[in-house]
Image (cartoon, rainbow, N blue to C red):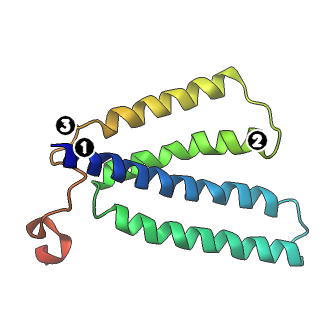
Amino acid sequence: MKNGIYKRIYAIFFLQGAVFIYSLTTVISKLVSDYKFLSKEFILLYILDFAVLGIYAILWQQLLKRFELSIAYANKAMTLLWSLLWSVLLFRENISPSKIIGVFLVIVGTIILNAPGNTKSEFLVEKSESNSFENRR
């Protein structure tokens, strides 16, 4: 039983880590917008943005092995939390109470979706071979 709990916690942290990495693209995109189009800085930051997206794509493919698509995709909404934090910490932007309430609701929804028993199968266990897409062809 404890092993299953540890797997669940690890998988959720892995998923949120991937979302965190994905949120970095919002920071890079904001930085890119400060530079003249096709300047050296613009191009370097644009390449960095693509690299981060590439890393995220690899992580995303691994996550889809462990989570149902609907659960994994719903967790991407946590990008709103990270983007809000980046906007305050890095860009000194103001946040309104409505933004805080909205992000809070997203967090609550994500927690509800990640709760055990909210999916047909245990979403953290590797999908069985009989359930894989390759075996359906």
Q: Nearer the viewer, mark 3 or mark 2?
A: 2
Question: Where is residue 17 drawn, in percent x and y?
Answer: 49, 54
Label 1, residues with CA under 10 Å away: few <14, some 14-19, many ≥20:
few
Image quadrant assignment for residue 87: top right
Q: Label 2: few (<14), some or many (≥20) within 10 Å?
A: few
Q: Residue at point 77% right, 56% down?
A: 30
> Viewed as shown, does residue 42 lie left or right of 121?
right
Q: Identify the residue under disc 1.
A: 5
Question: What residue does disc 2 label?
Answer: 89
CA gap between label 1 and label 3 equals: 13 Å
Distance, label 3 to label 2, CA atoms, is 36 Å
* Circle 2/circle 1 CB separation < 8 Å: no
Where 67 falls versus 1 (above or below)?
below
Q: In the rendered structure, which amino acid carries the disc numbered 3?
A: Gly
- Where disc 3 sits, the SS reads loop
As drawn, the label of residue 72 is: none
SS label for mark 1: helix
